[in-house]
Image (tube, rainbow, N blue to C red):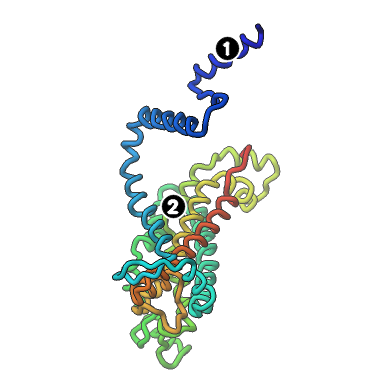
């Protein structure tokens, strides 16, 4: 009698909170699937207005992200020149990429990792440092400094074509050559953008200059959400300087913004292949000195029309991005109790 009463109470509690009881004894997999499908349809119909508002984003995500990624994955196992019907060749593109593509292994991969290891963490650290410094300023002038640092990322290609190309121009009119000749450091103009020794360094400097983008704004916004009472409590607990405040209070309190900025930094760094083309005016940089993975994709897709092979390189880039972002999620994940 007591067990029957407890069972009735449990069933009443489940009905009250709207919970779904477990599968009935002896229920077939097809029946379980049909029951879950009916439940899913009922929940969708109940929240139909929410899905109506989400529809524009879902359609854009489907058309411009999900479908292109699936098409690239399918084309990566084919040979396709854009005119004939794709022909399935299995994993031959990936084997060729790792064993026979000398440019990819000798130039593209080293250049990409060198560029990413300097620009990615460098731009990320600079974004945090400048955001923290601006946060210390009075509110009356804070917006002006924010705009001054964020403006280069908005200018983008215009700034590259007007400012940096003029700065590194290979004649005496170029700003850098003009200054160095006047100071007696060099005797004749240096062709900076066409010299493989300097191109990668110039690319890194220019990219760092334009790295104060959305991630920088996210960090600045995150700094403004940190509870100031935590700093007072930290001083009572023994924190002695500003560096300890940043390490023990500021960074743990803005982990979501740090994660968002890290993801944006990764995406921006790995897709930054157009900078060499914008600086040199050439689809392929001299001696492949500024050749990144995205340049390799453009080379095979739009110059050689080997779209199957270009799709394989795109899949490799996607996998590299995924594993790096998973590392960032583990690094900045909010742990239980925080």
Question: What kind of element bears circle 1?
Answer: helix
Expressed as whole percent of the image width and height from the top left, the position of residue 85 reads 32, 67
Residue that label 1 marks: 8
Q: Is residue 131 left or right of residue 239?
A: left
Cβ–Cβ under 8 Å for marks 1 and 2: no
Instruction: Please report whichever mark, 1 or 2, sits nearer to the chain's N-terminal start.
Output: 1
Marks 1 and 2: which is nearer the front? 1
Marking on residue 217 = 2
At label 1, counting other C-alpha atoms closer than 10 Å, the crowd grade (few under 14, some 14-19, many 20 or more) is few
Asked if 230 appears above or below 189 in the picture, the reply is: above
Most foreground residue, 125 or 295: 295
Asked if 225 appears above or below 316 in the picture, the reply is: above
Expressed as whole percent of the image width and height from the top left, the position of residue 228 reads 55, 40
Most foreground residue, 240 or 127: 127
Q: Work out which residue is located at the far left of the displayed protein and give it.
A: 83
Most foreground residue, 170 or 132: 170
Question: What kind of element bears circle 2?
Answer: helix
Expressed as whole percent of the image width and height from the top left, the position of residue 60 reads 33, 49
Q: Is residue 280 visible?
A: yes
């Amino acid at each position: 009698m007591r067990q029957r009463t407890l069972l009735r109470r449990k069933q009443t509690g489940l009905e009250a909170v709207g919970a779904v009881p477990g599968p009935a004894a002896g229920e077939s997999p097809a029946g379980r699937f049909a029951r879950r499908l009916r439940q899913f349809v009922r929940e969708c119909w109940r929240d139909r207005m929410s899905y109506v508002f989400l529809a524009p984003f879902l359609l854009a995500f489907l058309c411009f992200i999900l479908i292109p990624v699936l098409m690239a994955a399918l084309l990566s196992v084919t040979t396709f020149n854009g005119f004939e019907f794709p022909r399935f060749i299995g994993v031959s593109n990936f084997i060729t990429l790792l064993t026979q593509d000398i440019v990819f292994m000798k130039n593209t991969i080293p250049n990409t990792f060198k560029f990413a290891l300097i620009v990615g963490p460098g731009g990320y650290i600079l974004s945090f440092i400048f955001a923290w410094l601006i946060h210390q300023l009075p509110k009356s002038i804070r917006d002006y400094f924010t705009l001054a640092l964020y403006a280069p990322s908005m200018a983008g290609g215009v700034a590259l074509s007007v400012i940096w190309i003029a700065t590194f121009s290979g004649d005496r009119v170029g700003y850098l050559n003009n200054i160095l000749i006047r100071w007696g450091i060099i005797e004749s103009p240096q062709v900076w953008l066409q010299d493989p020794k300097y191109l990668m360094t110039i690319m890194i400097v220019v990219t760092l200059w334009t790295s104060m983008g959305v991630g920088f704004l996210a960090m600045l916004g995150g700094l403004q959400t940190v509870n100031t009472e935590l700093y007072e409590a930290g001083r009572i607990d023994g924190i002695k300087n500003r560096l300890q405040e940043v390490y023990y209070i500021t960074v743990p309190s803005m982990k979501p913004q740090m994660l968002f900025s890290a993801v944006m930094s990764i995406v921006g760094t790995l897709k930054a292949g157009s900078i060499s083309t914008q600086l040199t005016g050439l689809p392929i940089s001299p001696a492949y000195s500024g050749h990144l993975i995205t340049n390799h994709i453009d080379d095979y897709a739009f110059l050689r029309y080997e779209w199957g092979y270009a799709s394989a390189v795109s899949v490799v880039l996607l996998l590299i991005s995924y594993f790096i972002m998973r590392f960032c999620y583990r690094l900045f994940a909010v742990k239980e109790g925080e």
